[in-house]
Structures are given as structure tokens and as C-alpha cells.
């Protein structure tokens, strides 16, 4: 699997590159700013771009905007965003473009080598990854009107795992249900959140967005 790493910290780039190379990934390029990231993504067309959200030249969300451009121009390239702090809105903004081949992790996760490597591989294979801290923050918030109020505790548990990027099979293994039972819970979640089948919308993404905003 071919990987591009973009971060303005040379130390972080080199460390991540070494970890991924040791795990069998091919590091095709590194970039230190958003403009260089876009140039190298277009030139190398990697399987995964690991991107820091805050990068030069603006030191705002330049990395995120470059990542969205990559997803629009290179749909076969997965994007794993890295952030110094939990910033939920960035996860929501990324997911609005679709959940396939996207991820959002805190930078501290790079030190958790197995988790970081698994996240890169999952994104490269078209899956999605969401940092547990983002999910925990979403769980900790409450609103006067809870769009999830109609869900049973089991359905909430399934939706939480969906928000972490788990497949139905992985959810079934985690909570010790059959895959068919998980499918029934997922269908019930869609129904209760008012998400009918549609060619234009991805119901799983919309369900996760509802969860993150609740």
C-alpha cells in the first residue's frame, strides 16, 4: 500500500514514515505544506494520504481543505487526518464528503503503533476510522432535543460503533451478536432517524453525522 505523509513537522513525518515502512507500507512522498501535498498527491496518486489538519501556508485548516480536494480529484486515495486536539467539526466536515476511505485520529495515536498502522490500512482499503475521543466527546454532550431519543440502548451502542468506522461484522464481534442481528439494528436506526433509502445519500454517513451532532 502506497502512502503520502503531510505534516509541517519533519520529526513527525519521519517518525510516521519509519513506522509505516516497518509495517510494510511504501512511502511514496512527504510534504511539509498543503500546496506541496496537493502537488505530490496528484503526481503519485497514493493509496492513502496521512494529513495534518493545520499546515502552512495558512496554519488554519489548510490540511483539511487539501484533503477534501484530494478526495474530490482522486477518489481512490484514502485520507487519514491527524489533529493535535479533538476538533469535532473537522470530523463532521470530512464525513460530509462520504465515509469511505476517510479517517480522523489524534496525533498521539501515532505512538500507539498498532492502532495507527491499522487505521492507515483500514482507510487504504476503503473503510473509515474515527478517533475514540471524538466519539467520547459526542457521547458527553447533551441537547434539549435529542434526535437519538427513539433509539434503544442496543441501537445506540450499534450507532456508536458505526461512528468509530466499524463494519457490521466488526460490530457483531464486539458486542457478541450475529451479523444478521446487527443488520436489523442498523435498519431500525435508519428508520428511527428518518433516513429512507436514497441513491443520492449514504444513510450510514447521515446516521453518523446525526450521532456526532446530537
Image (spheres, grey):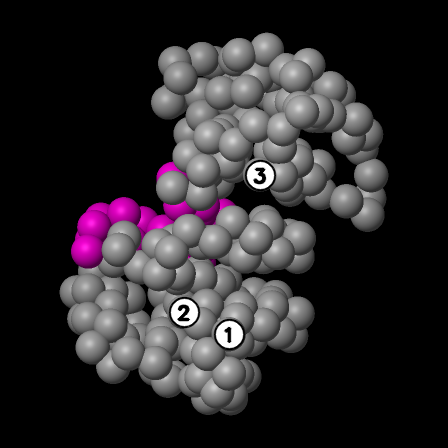
Kindly identify which residue carries mark 1.
60
| Distance between mark 2 and mark 1 Cα atoms | 11 Å
Magenta: main secondary structure: helix
Residue 207 rendering spot, x and y as whole percentages: 65, 34
Q: Residue at x 38, y 84 (%)?
A: 31
**Quadrant of res 19:** bottom left
| Distance between mark 3 and mark 2 Cα atoms | 21 Å
Please say whether residue 108 is visible from this viewpoint: yes
Q: Secondary structure at mark 3?
A: helix
Q: Residue at x 58, y 38 (%)?
A: 212
Q: Which one is in front in this view, the residue at disc 2 or the one at disc 1?
A: 1
Residue 102 rendering spot, x and y as whole percentages: 51, 55
Instruction: Verify whether residue 34 appears in magenta.
Output: no
| Distance between mark 1 and mark 3 Cα atoms | 22 Å
Kindly identify which residue carries mark 2.
52
Instruction: Verify whether residue 116 appears in magenta.
Output: yes
Judged left or right of residue 125, residue 207 is right
Position of 6 relative to 184 (above/below)? below
Position of 74 relative to 35 (above/below)? above
Mark 3 or mark 2: which comes first in sequence?
2
Q: Foreground: 121 or 84?
A: 84
- Classed neighbour count for the residue bearing mark 1: other residues with Cα under 10 Å, few (<14), some (14–19), many (≥20): few
Mark 2 or mark 1: which comes first in sequence?
2
Q: Residue at x 62, y 32 (%)?
A: 214
Q: Residue at x 27, y 53 (%)?
A: 109
- Classed neighbour count for the residue bearing mark 2: other residues with Cα under 10 Å, few (<14), some (14–19), many (≥20): many
Q: Foreground: 86 or 161?
A: 86
Mark 1 or mark 3: which comes first in sequence?
1
Kindly identify which residue carries mark 3.
212
> What stretch of residues is rendered in magenta?
111-132
Residue 50 rendering spot, x and y as whole percentages: 40, 67
Q: Quadrant of the N terminus?
A: bottom left
Amino acid at each position: 500500500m502506497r502512502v503520502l505523509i503531510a505534516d509541517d513537522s519533519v520529526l513527525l513525518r519521519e517518525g510516521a514514515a519509519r513506522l509505516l515502512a516497518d509495517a510494510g507500507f511504501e512511502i511514496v512522498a512527504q510534504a511539509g505544506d498543503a500546496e506541496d501535498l496537493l502537488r505530490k498527491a496528484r503526481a503519485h496518486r497514493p493509496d492513502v494520504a496521512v494529513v495534518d489538519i493545520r499546515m502552512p501556508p495558512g496554519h488554519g485548516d489548510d490540511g483539511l481543505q487539501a484533503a477534501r480536494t484530494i478526495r474530490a480529484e482522486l477518489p481512490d486515495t484514502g485520507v487519514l487526518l491527524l489533529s493535535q486536539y479533538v476538533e469535532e467539526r473537522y470530523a463532521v466536515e470530512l464525513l460530509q464528503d462520504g465515509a469511505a476511505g476517510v479517517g480522523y485520529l489524534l496525533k498521539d495515536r501515532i505512538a500507539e503503533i498498532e492502532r495507527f498502522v491499522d487505521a492507515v490500512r483500514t482507510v487504504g482499503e476503503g473503510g473509515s476510522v474515527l478517533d475514540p475521543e471524538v466519539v467520547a466527546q459526542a457521547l458527553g454532550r447533551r441537547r434539549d432535543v435529542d434526535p437519538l431519543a427513539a433509539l434503544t440502548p442496543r441501537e445506540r451502542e450499534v450507532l456508536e460503533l458505526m461512528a468509530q468506522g466499524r463494519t457490521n461484522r466488526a460490530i457483531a464481534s464486539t458486542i457478541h451478536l450475529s451479523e444478521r442481528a446487527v443488520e436489523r439494528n442498523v435498519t431500525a436506526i435508519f428508520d428511527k432517524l428518518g433516513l429512507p433509502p436514497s441513491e443520492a445519500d449514504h444513510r450510514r454517513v447521515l446516521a453518523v453525522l446525526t450521532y456526532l451532532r446530537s
